[in-house]
Image (cartoon, rainbow, N blue to C red):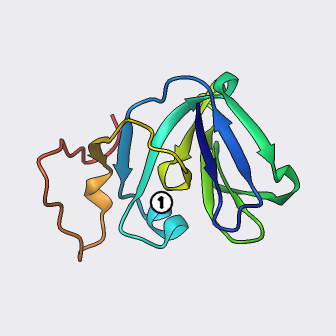
């Protein structure tokens, strides 16, 4: 089991199941949602995710057609990126995990729209978009 929470601790959850591959996303929406050079996400099956507290503190924002981002209304922590075309799973912001997930980012995505001040200094694969 892996536990996670938002910055203020209002939203708490656990994951009972394997995590998908982790990636660093450089698209402008992830940069703005995280206030950082990129957002790091992993896929989680809805059936493996259990919200423990804070359901009433989760806000959502339709950031683009078919994509909704969730966040804590109290502290602003980015939580999920939910795609309508993948209803069985969602992308979870890895930075909200309280436990070591046992996985590490495997690739960089949307590097074609990364901020001009960012330099990627590792050897992970870089995808111009998300294929």
Q: Residue 49 at x, y = what percent?
A: 67, 32
**Number of numbered discs present?**
1
Please tell me in which quadrant of the rendered image residue 90 appears: top right
Q: Residue 88 at x, y = what percent?
A: 64, 23
- The structure residue drawn at horizontal position 44% and vertical position 43%, both measured from the top left corner, is 100
Q: Residue 75 at x, y = what percent?
A: 70, 71
Where 131 sits versus 9, above or below?
Answer: above
Label 1: which secondary element: helix
- The structure residue drawn at horizontal position 59% and vertical position 28%, both measured from the top left corner, is 86
Viewer-closest of 18 and 26: 18
> Is 83 situated left or right of 24 in this image?
right
Where 18 sits versus 70, above or below?
Answer: above
> Is 80 situated left or right of 43 in this image?
right
Is residue 64 visible to the viewer in this orientation of the structure? no
Viewer-closest of 75 and 88: 75
- The structure residue drawn at horizontal position 24% and vertical position 44%, both measured from the top left corner, is 127
> Is 14 situated left or right of 36 in this image?
right
Q: Give the position of the C terminus as an image quadrant.
A: top left
- The structure residue drawn at horizontal position 48% and vertical position 73%, both measured from the top left corner, is 35
**On the image, numbered disc 1 is attached to which residue?**
30
Viewer-closest of 78 and 51: 51
Q: Residue 97 at x, y = what percent?
A: 54, 49
Is residue 21 visible to the viewer in this orientation of the structure? yes
> Is 40 situated left or right of 32 in this image?
left
Please tell me in which quadrant of the rendered image residue 1 appears: top right
């Amino acid at each position: 089991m892996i536990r996670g929470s938002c910055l203020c601790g209002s939203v708490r959850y656990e994951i009972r199941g394997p995590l998908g591959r982790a990636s660093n996303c450089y698209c402008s929406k992830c940069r703005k949602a995280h206030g950082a050079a990129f957002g790091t996400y992993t896929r989680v099956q809805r059936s493996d995710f259990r919200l423990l507290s804070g359901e009433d503190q989760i806000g959502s924002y339709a950031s683009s057609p078919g994509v909704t981002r969730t966040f804590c209304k109290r502290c602003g922590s980015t939580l999920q990126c939910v795609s309508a075309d993948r209803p069985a799973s969602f992308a979870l912001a890895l930075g909200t995990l309280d436990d070591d997930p046992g996985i590490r980012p495997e690739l960089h995505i949307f590097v074609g729209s990364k901020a001009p001040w960012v330099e990627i200094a590792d050897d992970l694969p870089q995808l111009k978009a998300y294929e």
